Amino acid sequence: MTTAPLTSMSVVATAGHVDHGKSTLVRALTGMEPDRWEEEKRRALTIDLGYAWTTLPSGCTVAFVDVPGHRRFIGNMLAGLGPVPAVMFVVAADESWKPQSAEHLAAAAALGVERVLLAITRADLADPGPATQRATAELADAGITPMRSVAVSARTGTGMDALRGALDDLVAGLPRPDPEARVRLWIDRSFTITGAGTVVTGTLPAGTIHVGDTLELSGRRVGVRSLQSLEQPRESVSGTARVAVNLRGVGTEELHRGQALLTPGAWPTTSVLDARLTLPSGSRTVAELPERLMLHIGTAALEARVRPLGSDGARLTVEEPLPLASGDRAILRDPGTGRVAGALVLDVDPPELRRRGAGARRAEELAARTAGVDLATEVVARGHLGAAEARRLGVGDDELDHPPHGIVRHSDLLVDSRVWARWQQALRDVTADHARTHPLEPWMPAEAARTAAGIPRLDLVAPLARSAGLLHEGGRVHEPGLTASLGAAEAGLAAIEARLEERPFATPEQPDLDAARLGPREIGAAVRAGRLLRLRDGILLQPIAPAKAMRILAGLPQPFTTSEARAALGTTRRVAIPLLEHLDEKGWTRRLDAGHREVVR
């Protein structure tokens, strides 16, 4: 049976040099063994990520991600540190600051971790004062001020109550994540449980996963069969939380650390991103970094090619797409030297850099760009942006419903107002040009106008035409009051119109049309202009001829025959039959049988 939904947990990562007592301290705090593998226990060395949890004096549950301290397992350490918002930094009193202390600190600083608690362990073996002073100074040099420093001894229990109180203070200041946010769970473990199937674990930073949900994994859909957190089954789990997800529709052989479970369709995936780097000590520009570095983000670790964009901007290209958003933080690490740079993701859908000078211009744009998703910035950068894509970039529905000044929204498309104005002008230009070059058909088809004006979608033509002072009717775009110009045939058409005014039901014959210089194109233009009415079999009449016919037919005894109608209208059978069928179609007359009709009253 599942327990109530889990909605309150904080997650803290450990950090510090190998053999400084991180796992021992976690074990003393929780009563649990964080080292999961037999080899770890045999060697007394954390190799992979360990997990344990406890309830603090405030009643808050805190879960620890215990990361390995040995340099050989630095990749595992970064996988544990990446998704976690707070760090308990451990330094041994009897050994003080060590090489991996510095490397873990550089990683935490690069990730922008601000909530740090300093724990000086083995205080029963040496005076904790010097180690505290050195560690505090090192953290300060990295731009981190620990919330508190506590000297403890896991062996004797000295300082443990103070440490628990400090942990309460640490997690109390963490921002409360949005339970309605889109889900992105970076996978740190995957395994099979007999009778249950595939299980993955990770740290859920925000959002909520429910039993029965469908999530996205590497482009495919998978189902959530069950959930566990704190070794208890759950109906749902909200971030921040450690969670185990039993998946339906995927095998463990298809999974690996660094993949992510996602809200379907809610995240863009990218293998090219632009970022602002925090350079390691000794480097002044991105150009001084190696061209290829390891990118660590979430629990993923991929080789990245680094293209400098200015002094601190860079374009990063990785070998497989990742679900990222502006504002994400990552680490770039040189495996050879161990030096790390921080990377703040600015754009997950950057423009191509093909033209000469494009890199320099992009560097200027990145220098002025802030982290996080700004709808105006994203729209202006592209010219126009679909609402669905904006949501994948992280834009909220409220901002989409009330776009900022300078953004025009039509249906599901958001457009830079300057681009909208360019489309308007282009539409005016192409319709005017069409009217000049097609005097017989000056009304431009909407699809042709869209293509010529460079407008991306047909449904934009109507609102653009309205805002540009044009008319959009009958699938055509034109200036108001526009009429077809028949040129040399105008006089001939006027003569035909005069003839039909005198004899409204005497259709002009082909010799009459030839004499008037009215060919098929001219006749078509006259029909579209509403100057002629074309019936079946090429019958041409005045547009008001049906109304004139109705006045005459209404005066006949009802019902009437086709011959009676022909005689009353003073026309031929070739004209009368198409005209009567036209009146039937309009619902003005009704055919009763093969030989009789009546006027519909």
Image (cartoon, grey):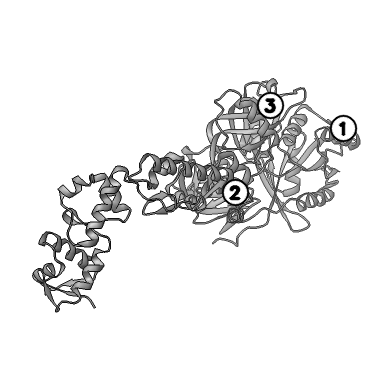
How far is disc 1 from disc 2 in space, using C-alphas? Answer: 53 Å
Disc nearer the start of the sequence (1/2): 1
Quarter placement of the C terminus? bottom left
Residue 126 is left or right of residue 72, and the answer is: right
Residue 43 is left or right of residue 582, and the answer is: right
Q: Look at mark 1 in the image and give the residue it sits on.
A: 134
**Residue 122: x %, y % from top left:** 83, 38
Disc nearer the start of the sequence (2/3): 3
Say which element carries label 3: loop
Question: Which is in the foreground here, disc 1 or disc 2?
Answer: 2
Say which element carries label 1: helix
**Residue 301: x %, y % from top left:** 60, 32
Q: Residues within 10 Å of mark 1 (few under 14, many from 20)?
A: some
Work out whether residue 567 or residue 80 is closer to the camera in this orientation and state it: 567
Q: Quadrant of residue 19?
A: top right
- Residue at the spot 80% in from the left edge and 33% down from the top edge: 142
Work out whether residue 174 or residue 571 is closer to the camera in this orientation and state it: 571
Q: Quadrant of residue 379?
A: top right
Say which element carries label 2: strand
Q: Look at mark 3 in the image and give the residue it sits on.
A: 310
Disc nearer the start of the sequence (3/1): 1
Query: Identity of the amino acid at label 3?
Result: Gly
Determine whether 164 is above or below 585 in the image. above
